[in-house]
Amino acid sequence: MYIRKRVPMARSAMVGWARGDSLNPLGELNRQSITSIVAPETVQIQRFECSAEAQQRIQTVTGAVLLQIQIRNRVRLQAGNAAGLATKAAKRLETLDSDLFTTFQNAFGEKPDTRPKWAPAGGWTHAQIVRQRFLGANKYLKDPWVIYSCWGRPRGAGGPEVNPDYLALALPGKHWIALGRRYWQADQAKNFDTTTYSLLLAALRAYYGPLLSDAPLAQAPLVRKIGNIYCYIQFAADLFNANLPDWVESNCPKSA
């Protein structure tokens, strides 16, 4: 598995650095949980599938007896964090300062104020494209037609599944997000960075379909970074100095 080499940043390049903030041995700001950085938004989740059998499987993973409403509320909270992160990232992309330039180029291998080769004259810049994709993910997470399935694919989409071995699954153009065993393992471990990022990743995948790939790096090494969903999550995490799980960092290539 590829692991990106961390490069120490000068204090002047650290987004949000202030005197008195603690630094790690590399001279970097200590990263924080994304849930302490973003303001969660309201996600209603009007369509929710979670059968008694699914609840039992979640109980087996988490060790907690949870009612369907409790499971739903847990998912709503993390979806709200994901929506809040998408909004915060989109808002930050409105100001192209030196800090954003550095973070953007590190994540996507492109300058934020340049346009893709295929874009027409006067078309969107790379920063505008990424911003719009975060806004689209936010819209998808709040869409009342989206089914949130607590354990594997929903009915009518290949479910129910006995052992969904993934974090969160979504398919282009489909109105559902399926949570897998790994999602609930992260929830049980209180790894809310992973649960938040996995829901944002699923929303990006569903809303922008074939334009964005969620294939592991080893399976899709030639995908441009602007088309790699993991690079969007890394960009947001780096931008706000949030925790960056290995499963994100290892799937965003170091070079374009």
Image (cartoon, rainbow, N blue to C red):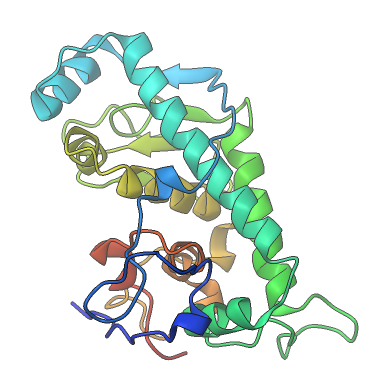
The residue at the far right in this view is 122
Q: Can residue 240 be seen in this view?
A: yes
> Residue at 57% across / 38% down in the picture?
141
- Left or right: where does residue 47 sit relative to residue 143? left
> Residue at 58% across / 51% down in the picture?
86
Q: Is residue 102 above or below residue 52?
A: below
- Left or right: where does residue 119 sit relative to residue 108? right
Q: Is residue 184 above or below residue 34?
A: above
Q: In which quarter of the image is residue 25?
A: bottom left
Q: Can residue 176 be seen in this view?
A: no
| Quadrant the N terminus occupies | bottom left
> Residue at 45% across / 48% down in the picture?
202
The residue at the far front in this view is 20
Looking at the image, which is closer to me, 107 or 256? 107
Looking at the image, which is closer to me, 97 or 188? 97
| Residue 72 placement (x, y as % from top left) | 39, 19
| Residue 227 placement (x, y as % from top left) | 53, 73
Q: Is residue 26 above or below residue 155?
A: below
> Residue at 37% across / 36% down in the picture?
178
